[in-house]
Amino acid sequence: MVDFRDLSLKNKLTLIILATSGLMIFIISVIFFINEAISIKRFLRHNVSTIAKITARNSTAALVFDDSDTARELLQALEAEPHIVAAAIYDKHGKLFAKFSLLKNEDLPQKIDLKRAFQQPQLSPNMYLCSKDSGGFMTDFLDVLTPVRLKGRLIGAVFIRVDQRWIFTHIKLFAVMILGIMVLLIVFSYFISSRLQKIVSEPIERLVRTMQKVKTEQDYSIRVASQWGRDELGMLMEGFNNMLEQVQERDRRLKESREQLQRQVVLRTEALKLSEAQKQKLWFQKKIQQAYSELVSRMNSIDIDEMLDTCLNQISDVVGAAWGSVFLWDQQAEDLVEKQHYVAEVVNKWKEQNPACLDRLNDIAYKKAKEALEKNELIRDNIKEEPKNGIFSSLVLMALPLRFQNRSIGALVLAGPREPDDYTLAFLNNSTRQLGVAIHNAMTFEDLVEKSAELEHSNLELQRASRMKSDFLANMSHELRTPLNAIIGFSELLLDQHFGKLNDVQKDYLSDVLDSGRHLLSLINDILDLSKIEAGKVEVLAENVSIKEILESGFTMIHYKAMKHNIDLALNLDESVPETVWADQQKMKQIVYNLVSNAVKFTPDGGKIELAAKKVNRSWLRQHVPDDFVDDDLLSQGKEDDPFLLISVKDTGIGIPEEHIKKIFDAFEQLDSSRSKRYKGTGLGLALCKNLVRLHGGLIWVKSKPGEGSTFYFSIPLNQQN
């Protein structure tokens, strides 16, 4: 059986979507099936109840006049009902008066205790079960007994037996139909899920294939082709490509260093005299240079353990070390941790005589590695003989820090029988420097692999959240706005008195209903608009629109409300402002209206509101926009003299406390959040303005002091290119 964790990402996505939709299809099918079974049973009982009542009413005369022939004819008429297999009429003493039966060997009771029978559970008014087991859903027959009364006096009863076996056939047929529909819906769900999962799985699979190719071929010139936007996947691919560029550049530098060393070898070979001592010295230099070249080539591995094992063994072999160890810095533990060690044959013999020798060497190496990392320099020391600890001869110890740029990575510790010469020290310095770069690259690659797995999980969660948000928006749009529009429409019809005159109290109540309905509809529309913007489903339909027309429309819509509160409105259009701006006319009007409407709401009677516009540039925005509202991406790109349209709404209202200014543009944030707040509103208007301004590539901010009023600003680029 295949483990779910071993499946590919696209199969996981397909199975998750298919399992969710399949569960919902199954639950809905079960509900339909149960509802159909209950409906059939209710229909049967209702039908039998009606027939029993009619028969009881028609048999009154036959019982009163003791006319059994008429009673049998009345029961014989029940043959027209296909599900009734037997019926009988009993007199007031419970004796069989007349009967009718379609079943062979059907023996109806000759006498019934009516008083006891009518104490049984009722199927419906005046309709009783005849026995404890009758009327069950899985029984073959349903027996019912209906009293026959004359002026409230019991004069007899009507007994009817109904065949329920046809219900089972109907339910089986319905079950087969439901099962067929379930299979078709599941197949359709699989078809849809197999298409939708490609949105997330394809870019991640492309990244994984590229990563495996780089790991296999050790070719850092390979790039992952990115056709995605600025989402997490796009950023991940861009970061992966940037890392490969850095690794490729470092690989190029390593090759240049190796070629330079080779040239130096040639020059030194020609300059040295061919004496035995010089030959030996030259041989040793060549060995070091060759070892360094091989070492650099092996540092390209992205497997840290494999690379450290190979490099430590080669370095120890070149310098003649008897023991060595590599320590790496653990960020979580904030301490050095031994990652790899090397043990020569001589130390293995010590270990056989005294196993404590490795522990003693590790303790000494840890202290010297920490000292080398703290001082960022080569630490040299001597390890004296300690036979009781398993060290049977003195060793020369060297601890070298491993760093990448200004970051501490770890330390390399070596111990050997002889002092290193200048060539050995140079080899060690170059090797540790390159080893630090290689370890950093390998650790970076491991981090990238982990982040890829985390991103895969996040994408699954985002897909589920996006589906839930879409369902919420659909329900909001249909289930709330539809009845609200009906409430508003009927309220307007009643207020227009098309259906009769209303008194003053009725008009006031209807006006409150109409205002509340419109307020709630406005809230729902704002929530939907804000959600659509955040989901990226709103586009800016930009064109050259008149700036003056946009500003005047904002005053036109709130002019009556301002006059009602004796608020003075002023429009100030600077001469530097051009006639048109490249923007979405409807959204610009919505921004201006929301800001002006807010100003009217928070400005006391007799106040003043000024709507102004002027032309500024990017340099002006950098100097005047408060730090809390700065968008570095907008202000850092483009030229200093790029033109912007600046629109401000200044009021003489209550002002905004300093602690509220930073979050005034957040959704559902209001100055007065108490339960008995004075100013109406939902806190969505400014959040919507902020998102609409951002869609235009602009900034929005506010300056205010309590009691002195507020000034809201927003700016958008004037040129289409910006």
Image (cartoon, grey):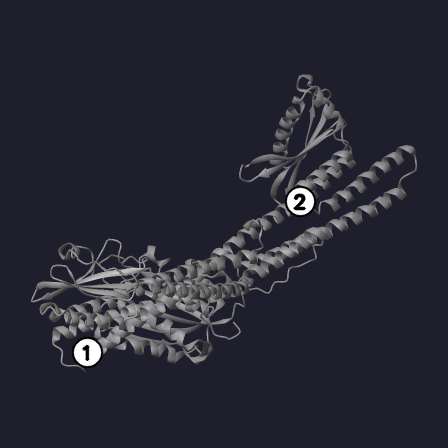
* Nearest the eye: 513 or 621: 513
Task: Name the secondary structure under disc 2.
Answer: loop
Q: Which of the 4 image quarters holds residue 657?
A: bottom left
594 vs 150, left or right, is right
Asked whether residue 614 is in view, the answer is yes
* Residue identified by numbered label 1: 495
Q: What residue type is labelled 1?
A: Leu
Is tag 2's residue or tag 1's residue first in the polypeptide sequence? 2
Asked whether residue 607 is in view, the answer is no
Residue shown at 29% from the left, 57% from the top = 136
Q: How crowded is mark 2: few (under 14 residues within 10 Å), some or many (20 or more)?
A: some
Q: Residue 485, relative to residue 272: is it above or below?
A: below
* Nearest the eye: 161 or 211: 161
Task: Name the secondary structure under disc 1.
Answer: helix
* Nearest the eye: 503 or 614: 503
The percent position of residue 450, horizontal first and vertical second, equals 57, 49
Is the residue under label 1 in contact with that under label 2 (CB below 8 Å)? no
Q: Residue 303: which numbered mark, if any? A: 2
The percent position of residue 172, horizontal first and vertical second, equals 40, 63
Residue pushed farthest top? 388
